[in-house]
Image: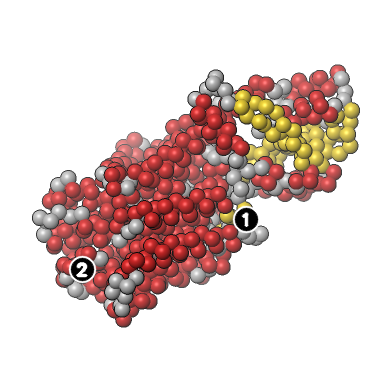
Amino acid sequence: MVSDAAGASVPDKANPANGHDGHKPQGFLALVLGSIGVVFGDIGTSPLYAMREALHHTRSGVETELAVLGVVSLVIWALILIVTLKYVVLLMRADNKGEGGTLALMALARRTLAKPSGKRSATVFFLGVIGAALFYGDGIITPAISVLSAVEGLKDAPGMAGRVDNWILPISAGILIALFMVQSRGTHRVAAFFGPITLVWFLVLGGLGLYHLFDDPSILRAASPHYGIVFLFENGFLGFVILGSVFLAVTGAEALYADMGHFGKKPIQAGWLWIVFPCLVLNYLGQGGLILANPAARENPFWEMVPQIAYWPVLILAAVATVIASQAVITGAFSVTQQAVSLGLLPRIDIRRTSETQAGQIYVPQVNTLLLIGVLVLLFSFKTSSALAAAYGIAVTGSMFVDTLLAFVIVRVLWKWRWSATLAVLVPMVAIDLTFISSNLLKIPQGAWMPLVFGAVLVLIMWTWTKGAQILSDKTRRDSVPLVDLIDILKARAPHRAPGTAIFLTSDPDMTPVALMHNLKHNKVLHEKNVIATVRTAETPRVSEAERVRIEVVNDDFKKLIITYGFMETPNVPKALTLLRKQQGLKFDIMSTSFFLGRRSVIASAHSGMPLWQDKLFIFLMKNAANPTDFFKIPPGRVVELGAQVTV
């Protein structure tokens, strides 16, 4: 079994790498329903505020009819061009062994461009860092704006009439705090209801839209891009600002690609084309028809659509839908963190499993706490969903632009498209991305600076960690003795032998681990059997058990053990050792095996290759990294740590 981004369990065959095309109809429909519950939660809450914000920015001189037709036309064509053509048709073909998302695409692009020397493209790596950082920027805004926009529906609820206006923020904060507090318990029970509830939400969206479509059927003219183009020209420079609000309708599109590995391409594509896209288009057309018939409804068109008799059920359903959308973003942040740690972008972080049987269900306490703090700061700083909308979008547009640039490598190098075909497809996508980025940059003074600053801080942290780790690795390699040289030394002067097996964890199996050198230097002892173990991360999401472990006999005293995990897997060294028993008959008695780890005490240096302030940041990150004993799931009672002082 594998698990989706929100913790829902889905069969292995959902993964394209496992051939989900062979699903029976019932299994396929279950995957479609599951994808609706997880993948489309964010984009499904956009009708609450997207239309309202776009019309709010229209120039007063532009007549209502053209404004409504223009905005609805722009929204529909944004859904067609960005979501359907870019993500559903093109990018979902660019999977990394069934997985999608910016980091998976980065790993695939780096592997595609890998040189014979083993060097990877620094540009592609940096693009992946930017994309991951922007994802977190989006991650703290989505829960705040989604939940707040739903709770704001209380203002117009029957019988409320201003009675709860002062309680909007506390109620929203309470919902969000409760949501973050339950993360440590796991989400599989809640996730079982995500699909059906979200399906009902989309059907309600489509039903409301269809009902109000008949308020003024002439709104169907908005299906023509002509009205969107004319509307932008009529608004002049203000059209760029409006595009920033129109983009709110497609936020969440990147989730189609990021969650591809959990459900497979075809279930997500079917969910979008059969249900989500038609319901969203109907709802936006219905909002437009309502405003054409009643111009005053433009102040809050979504809630004006809801009949009084159904207001409370729709309000409750909207609140639940926004919680589901927020849940998908939160668990997505956990998943991205796991990938970032595995790929070396972040230091080791405490990653806990919330299920013994479902691998995808993880909980990252530090990320959960930081997200909660960020969400609450946003909530009480901006106070309304309209104010939050100004900050929303810039991180998503940046992330989508990164996806387009990485897709260029896949299309041109991996798929070997001709230049003419590559440019014909990707240049329009780049143009659309840059247009939306430009429009969202205009919102920087109103709050769009916040996710940019947040993303920049994360880029700085990732850059510092990767650069510092490389400097530390190079220095350790220079100061270490090659393993073959140590073997020659031991032949000339044999040390005292201790019974049992010693496993030395190191990042470079060709060099003598620091812990081994210290053991010989201070304890003057060598175990009967010594294993130099290295845990590596492949640039693929998962590694089969057949490729998990590889052992190489150096001589009677030493063996090299290479343990490989995919970037979406959690390392477990003892479990990997059991595979050696199954595959090669090698026995490792965990109770007679000692694990030696080198603990490095890092001191800042003015000549390290990094500025002093960056050295100190790297040292801070190292000190707060998770203990390797816990990270690699090694029994603490079998671990020996030997320290060394290193300057960077």
Res. 97 visible in picture: no
Residue nearer the viewer, 39 or 369: 369
The image shows residue 269, relative to residue 622, as above or below, that is below
Please tell me whether mark 1 or mark 2 is closer to you in this view.
2
Q: Residue furthest bottom?
A: 309
Name the quarter where the C terminus is drawn: top right
Q: Which residue is mark 1?
A: 353
Mark 1 / mark 2, whichever is N-terminal: 2
Picture residue at 14% right of the left edge, 62% below the top = 64
Residue 100's disc is: none
> Toward the viewer: 267 or 509?
509
- Residue 229 visible? The answer is yes
Assign a secondary structure to mark 2.
helix
Q: Nearer the viewer, residue 377 or 388?
A: 377
Could you tell me residue 131's position as x and y percent? 43, 42
In the displayed structure image, the side of residue 134 where residue 495 appears, left or right: right
* Residue indicated by mark 2: 297
Does dot 1 land on a helix, a strand or a loop?
A: strand
Name the quarter where the N terminus is drawn.
Answer: bottom right
